[in-house]
Amino acid sequence: MSYLDCPFSHEATLGCSCGSHRTQNEHDALAVAQQEALRTDLGLLSTRVFEAAAMKALFPRDENRRRFLRAVGATTAAATIAEFLPLDVLTAMAQDKGALEKKELKIGFIPITCSTPLIMADPLNFYRNEGLDVSLVKTAGWALIRDKMLNKEYDASHMLAPMPLAISLGVGSVAEPMNVATIQNINGQAITLALKHKDKRDPAQWKGMTFAVPFEYSMHNFLLRYYVAEHGLDPDKDIQIRVTPPPEMVANLRAGNIDGFLGPDPFNQRAVYDEIGFIHILSKELWEGHPCCAFGVRSEWIKQNPNTFAALFRAIVGATAMAHDPRHRSVIAKVIAPASYLNQPVPVIEQVLTGRYADGLGSVRNDPERIDFEPFPWASMAVWMLTQMRRWGYIKQDVDYKAIAERIFLVTDAKKRMAEMGQAAPKDPYKTFKVMGKDFDPAQATAYAKSFKISKIVA
């Protein structure tokens, strides 16, 4: 019986090191078989990515590419490409004309599923195929990510989407111009509560409880505040919000130091896997399609390394496109599970990426959009984050929301680079959306920030 079929029976009293097989020999045999299957799957994925990139390099115009495929068939096309055009030639064709200013890069990341595109770009050779030699550096927390970016120890980094806004404005740190090159993921978070709170499904009952979020300048903090305030609680008076690095959230929940957390996966699912928590609500139920993490770069670095930045952008967006396709999610879970990346059991990551998951309350749910990966840095999303920073007192006065959003979120650059890669980018970066049923119009940002009953803005 699989873990998904029986969420509470994974700790079987069996005779292998992981506790899930009858004997250690059975465990070892299955591990070898899984490794061979993973190598095969990775080879197929790499081949598909290679072939797609090759076709786009050879036939930049969509209609020409389709005409060629109709004429010869996909199998013949792939064989022809493999025979006559070596990988290094195609790689050179796909790159910008300009030489890379810097090839060896150091990129920071936090071990969460939000960083999936950035991580998988390493073992699946997205960086290498752009001529980049990238060292991914697992980092303990967001404050350390921020400091290493400010100290120029990292060339670029996985960041929470609001972080470049806060750093650029000098909120919570010295001011340093930062840019959001791409959004890493949308959705993919949840509110998880300790099992002892199964009877407290109404947030109005949470008065006096302690919750963890990964950072002050995070969608987690802003969404948690929004959620409890909509249920009549003042997040600064009625509950305690504690900043906790994501990898420490489950341990703190187990120890009773916190009652719950609004945090990134895989830690919501890990709390269920460890039988200490349950998923109260997915973040997508608060705001369908909300951003979470971003790929952040110092503005100065982009100016100094424009060709390298273009290559880095292509690698990340290419990986994001693969991660967006549900067909690849199970294999990607295996790719990012190892200790050097997320260091989590594959079943935990797979439940997050595929959306078929145990909720900790005895049910198995299916939500394929639990997490998704879309790279476009919507300016309207930046404006919403700024309104919440204003609402809760992180920004002390009204600001030009639109000007800040467009300066920090690289909308124009994203449109250009995505078009070069044959990917569609929206014409208008100011889409509207709903947060807990309330319409958000980015053109009315100042009024929106002041429209809430529970707020730190003094009228």
Image: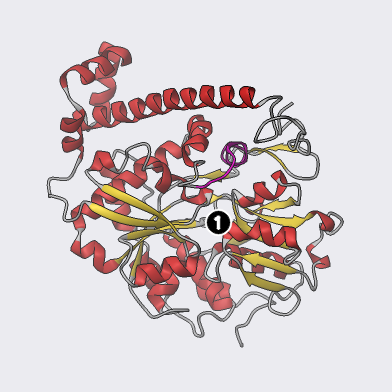
Q: Which residue is mark 1?
A: 433
In percent of width and height, residue 262 lies at: 65, 60
Whether residue 279 is visible, yes or no, is yes
Rendered position, 129 above or below 454: above
Q: Quadrant of the N terminus?
A: top right
Locate residue 219 relative to residue 307 in the image: left or right: right
Let me know if residue 343 is in the magenta part.
yes
Rendered position, 310 above or below 202: above
Locate residue 214 relative to residue 194 in the image: left or right: left
Whether residue 401 is visible, yes or no, is no
Q: Who's the residue at 55% across and 75% down the image? A: 447
Rendered position, 88 above or below 215: above
Quarter holding residue 258: bottom right
Q: Which residues are magenta?
A: 342-353
Rendered position, 250 above or below 354: below
Locate residue 236 relative to residue 147 in the image: left or right: right
Q: Who's the residue at 33% across and 25% down the image? A: 47
Total count of labels: 1
- The kind of residue on which mark 1 rests is Phe
In percent of width and height, residue 147 lies at: 40, 71
Assess disc 1: are there few (<14), some (14-19) or many (≥20) residues with their C-alpha within 10 Å of its C-alpha: some
Q: Quadrant of the C terminus?
A: bottom right
**Mark 1: which secondary structure?**
strand
Let me know if residue 450 is in the magenta part.
no
Q: Who's the residue at 57% across and 72% down the image? A: 448
Who is closer to the viewer here, 28 or 403? 28
In percent of width and height, residue 244 lies at: 60, 66
Who is closer to the viewer here, 342 or 78? 342
In percent of width and height, residue 33 lies at: 53, 22
